[in-house]
Image: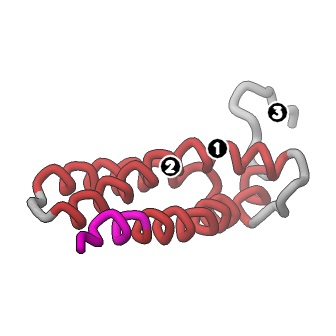
């Protein structure tokens, strides 16, 4: 009996399930400025997936890499959901509210 497909499906389910709250909490505490961490993690996982000879491990790393890269877009979508009021604003939003916009002139 070959269970590779079942294991890969389970790994995919778990990885995607873990990244859903990771993106929400990441945007809540750090804003969108952590997108590059998802990029580096995704590229590293994809590079590792082509170097690993074991099928299930390679597929798992591929799923992890693609999920990291997909999370970059979800991070920015989460920002829009917060702006629409669908999710609460976190400390990262409070820090950005106090920063003056670089294109706006400040009057003394």
Residue 22: horizontal and vertical position, in percent?
A: 58, 67
Badge 1 or badge 3: first in the primary sequence: 1
Residue 5: horizontal and vertical position, in percent?
A: 33, 63
Q: Please identify, in this view, whether the residue under mark 1 or under mark 3 is nearer the observer.
A: 1
* Image point (30%, 48%), residue name: 43
In this figure, which residue is indicated by the disc labeled 1? Answer: 76
The reply to whether callout 1 and callout 2 are in contact (CB within 8 Å) is: yes
Badge 3 or badge 2: first in the primary sequence: 2
In this figure, which residue is indicated by the disc labeled 3? Answer: 106
Q: Is residue 8 magenta?
A: yes
Colour theme? secondary structure
* Image point (38%, 59%), residue name: 64
Magenta residues, as a range?
1-9
Q: Could you tell me which secondary element the residue under label 2 belongs to?
A: helix
The prevailing secondary structure element of the residues shown in magenta is helix
In this figure, which residue is indicated by the disc labeled 2? Answer: 35
Residue 87: horizontal and vertical position, in percent?
A: 83, 59
Determine whether 57 is above or below 108 in the image. below
On screen, residue 68 versus residue 107, left or right, reads left
Q: Could you tell me which secondary element the residue under label 1 belongs to?
A: helix
Mark 3 surroundings: few (<14), some (14-19) or many (≥20) residues within 10 A: few
On screen, residue 88 versus residue 63, left or right, reads right
What distance separates the C-alpha of mark 1 from that of mark 3? 28 Å
Residue 30: horizontal and vertical position, in percent?
A: 61, 61
Determine whether 71 is above or below 94 in the image. above
In depth, the one of 107 and 10 nearer the eye is 10
Q: Could you tell me which secondary element the residue under label 3 belongs to?
A: loop
Q: Looking at the rendering, in which quadrant would you find the N terminus?
A: bottom left
On screen, residue 38 versus residue 71, left or right, reads left
């Amino acid at each position: 009996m070959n269970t590779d497909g079942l294991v890969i499906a389970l790994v995919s389910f778990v990885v995607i399930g873990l990244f859903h709250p990771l993106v929400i909490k990441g945007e809540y505490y750090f804003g969108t400025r952590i997108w590059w961490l998802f990029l580096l993690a995704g590229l590293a996982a994809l590079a590792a997936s082509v170097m690993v000879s074991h099928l299930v491990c390679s597929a798992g790393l591929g799923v992890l890499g693609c999920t990291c890269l997909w999370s970059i877009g979800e991070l920015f979508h989460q920002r829009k959901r917060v702006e629409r009021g669908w999710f609460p604003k976190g400390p990262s939003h409070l820090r950005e509210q106090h920063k003056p916009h670089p294109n706006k002139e400040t009057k003394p």
